[in-house]
Image: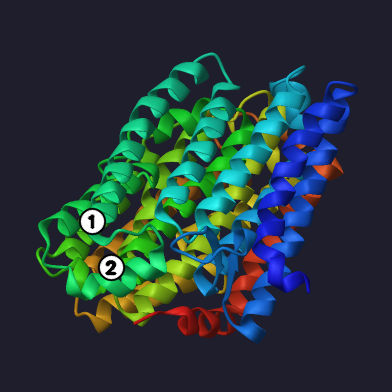
Amino acid sequence: MIESHLPAYIALTFVLFSVLIPAFGLWRSELSQPLAVIGSGIAAAFSVYGFLSYLNDGALRYFFGGWEPPVGIEFVYDGLSGFFVMVINVVAFFVLIHSHHIGKREFPGKEMPYYALAMLMMLGFNGMILTGDLFNLYVFLEIASLSGYALIAIGEKPAPYAAFRYLIIGTAGGTLYLLGVGFMYTVTGTLNIIDMAAMLPELYANNAVFAALILMIVGIGVKAALFPMHGWLPDSYTYAASSSSALIAPIGTKVAAYILFRIILWLFGIEITDAVAPITTIIGIFAAIGILYGSIMAIAQSELKRMLAYSSISQIGYIIMGLSLANPWGFAGAMLHVLNHAVMKACLFMISGQMRLKEGHSDITKFDDSYRKKYPWTMAAFTIAAISMIGLPPLAGFFSKWYLVLGTIDNSNWLFLAVILISSLLNAVYFFRILEKVYMRNPFKGQKEASDATRDESPLSMMIPTGILAIGLIVIGFANAVIVSVLLGIYPL
């Protein structure tokens, strides 16, 4: 049956299309984007089907070549991996549909290598999530990272420098993670996560285990842009091509967050993680600082993409804070925010790409009330995503923050509660200033230009995926109770 081989099918889909795109793209480069859409669509369909199968039949362990661990390599399709794979592949599918016209404008003549790299990056992300082996996780991490560096470099003039900076910092993070894996292998003699987790209760007092935990958390913290290891992110998201920002921003840091979830909750467990030092508390404090730092820095930006980049630093903080709370409500809020932020941030970065396509810029200072007449549906989608980011009901963003609030109350952590409330106010500041420019007339400027504006929406290939994601935020908001009930069933403690 298809279910028994599903984890391999998802990864092999991206392998296949990373080969097909150069093969056909060298012949006709205009085929590259449709092939990428088809490949990501097939993977998204597999992912949705796989998660529904998990809900009915439980977790699946797939052994490559029939060789069981610790000798063989396995993919694990459980609730955590199934949820993350579904989120990233569905979002990537819509972003790649949206990218058609952006590619013609922002990286003309480079479509074939661009979309081949996108398939390789998605292969890396999916492999990181599905693998049940710590070393193979590193292998897929490097596949995703190398592809991501190249995608970021295909952008504005400063993009190669931003990509090189990310390469240096990302390589350091990957190296720290690999050192941690080496320590764990030395102690346990296995690289399989399930086998290793069974051994750790007897080994947690070993100093090498504690060192490995710290190294892996710091290394993956770099990839997740957890404060203060976020330095690579603002320039990378700002100067990359608009489709690269829309693809990497909603997905890349979420995959890194997945690794932290897998390591802390599934491999070590909270008791072992905090046995020697209050690691989850320290992570939560850094996450809280990152939430406030990202929000304050976002207020100071005049470029929409850069504002969204700093906002991403803040939003990843919510996810890591939920993890650090180590209770069911915090876990549900963090997992729901993974879904919400992926949809919200993809929608917002896609809209910034549409602004650059139509206006030639995404400079907030140049926004005015003519936009509501020229781009009424685009601005409506932006408004929905912005209000969801702020956290107003009944949109999706409110409910993930609500469950995080319940998690902080459950732990009596009033400091984290205050951070969530303050950051929501800061989010309102930097999003409402844009909505004010778009929907309110400036009394100090003439209104002739705005009144004469005619509708000039982006092509349907851009509007449809943007609209679907915006509507998705409303649907997720109303369906939050159902989603959370499923997520609480995944919680391992």
Image-based side of 481 in relation to 347, left or right = left
Kind of residue at badge 2: Phe
Query: Is the residue marked by circle 1 packed among few (<14), some (14-19), or many (20+) residues within 10 Å?
Result: many
Of the pair 45 and 368, the residue shown nearer to us: 45
Of the pair 176 and 403, the residue shown nearer to us: 176
Residue 75 in sight from this viewpoint: yes
List x then y, in percent, for residue 259. 41, 57
**Is 311 placed above or below 232 here?**
below
Of the pair 201 and 367, the residue shown nearer to us: 201
Image-based side of 6 in relation to 139, left or right = right
Q: CA distance from mark 2 to mark 1?
A: 8 Å
Label 2 residue SS = helix
Residue 358 in sight from this viewpoint: no
Residue depicted at 59% across the width and 22% down the height: 155
Kind of residue at badge 1: Leu
Residue pointed to by mark 1: 213
Q: Within the image, what quadrant is residue 122 found in? A: top right
Q: Within the image, what quadrant is residue 327 found in? A: bottom left
Label 1 residue SS = helix
Marks 2,1: beta carbons within 8 A: yes
Residue lying farthest right?
A: 28
Residue pointed to by mark 2: 268
Residue depicted at 39% across the width and 61% down the height: 319
Image-based side of 151 in relation to 35, left or right = left
